[in-house]
Image (cartoon, rainbow, N blue to C red):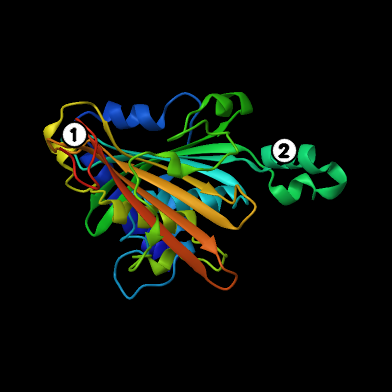
Amino acid sequence: MTRLLAIPLIFLIALATLALGQEPAVTDEFVQAPGYEPVDSLELEDELDSLLPPVDSVFRRGSDLGPLAKIALILEAREGPQERARYHLTASVVPGTDDVLVQLDRYNLGPLIHEETVEAYGAENVADAETFGVGPHVSWRLVTTPLRGNRAIIVAASRMELSAAAAGEDQCLLSSCLSTVTDLGEEGTLQMLEPIEDAAVNPALVTDDLLLSPAAVFALMAGQAGLVLEGNEAARELSADSVIVAQAQLDRNLGQEIAQDGLFRVGQLMDDSVEAHWYRLVEFSMGDSTELLEGRGVECRRGEPDGLLCP
């Protein structure tokens, strides 16, 4: 059965590769950047299928997934989960095409939190380093394009392991990527957090963990923030090689509670007054259930926002 599914996908990926933008150097340069090692895109699509529940459809199980959910699923599957981590995501469009360039970096903050905890309470009162999480900092890149029933077929992919020195210089959405402080509420445009009434969580991305999976969180934040990748206005109207249209940060279990805090920015809006939309998602574990809270904000081209309105 796997072979029967894989054969047509080879042709789909070949077609998608041919259909990539008028400037293929843009996508090649993205996945072939120094330090990144190529990963077989067909193997990734097959692996995604194995991670998802069966569907009553002629299409593959991951055909409805967008690039943000796909890259998060791939990173977690290939690298294994991390107990305490910060994720930084960027999504770019290539003007004149439907191609999306998405990068997801995961910083393992377990060792730093362990070190700080030992300094505060003494080694005899703290669990070992493995309990806090061991493993490298990693970065994944995907190039996707919509094609024949697939919302975001993967046509190219690569991976890089980040050194401690390189990770220490990286800046995430609001702070240093290796900062153990988590307070995404510092973004000044955000309104107060309120419970989410209708959380459009993709059930295929929900796991048995105490918290939503990173893939579910990124997909939920993108939807709630109004991110549009297919038919993005910036891709139609701008002439740059590529344009970053979304950035996100997700802090997972960095405090004493089982919780995660995500912040999402949708920019490059073709709007005279609004520069960007901001969205924050906070999830707390309540034991056998979780509580989801959200906050919204706008970034104005001129002046200060009045609630969610710009002058």
Residue 308's x, y, as percent?
23, 47
Q: Residue at x 36, y 45 (%)?
A: 264
Q: Which mark is residue 33?
A: none
- Residue 186 visible in the snapshot: yes
The foreground one among 68 and 178 is 178
Residue 60's x, y, as percent?
34, 64
Res 4 → quadrant? bottom left
Q: Is residue 76 above or below residue 167?
A: below
Mark 2: amino acid: Glu
Quarter of the image containing the N terminus? bottom left
Res 168 → quadrant? top right
Q: Is residue 17 above or below residue 166?
A: below
Residue carrying label 2? 116
Q: Is residue 294 left or right of residue 260?
A: left
Mark 1: amino acid: Pro
The foreground one among 195 and 127 is 195
Residue 174's x, y, as percent?
44, 34
- Residue 45 visible in the snapshot: no
Residue 256's x, y, as percent?
65, 52
Element carrying mark 2: helix
Q: Is residue 231 above or below residue 26?
A: below
Mark 1 surroundings within 10 Å by alpha-carbon count, few (fewer than 14), some (14 through 19), many (20 or more): many
Task: Tell which residue pokes out farthest to the right in this image.
Answer: 124
Q: Which mark is residue 95?
A: 1
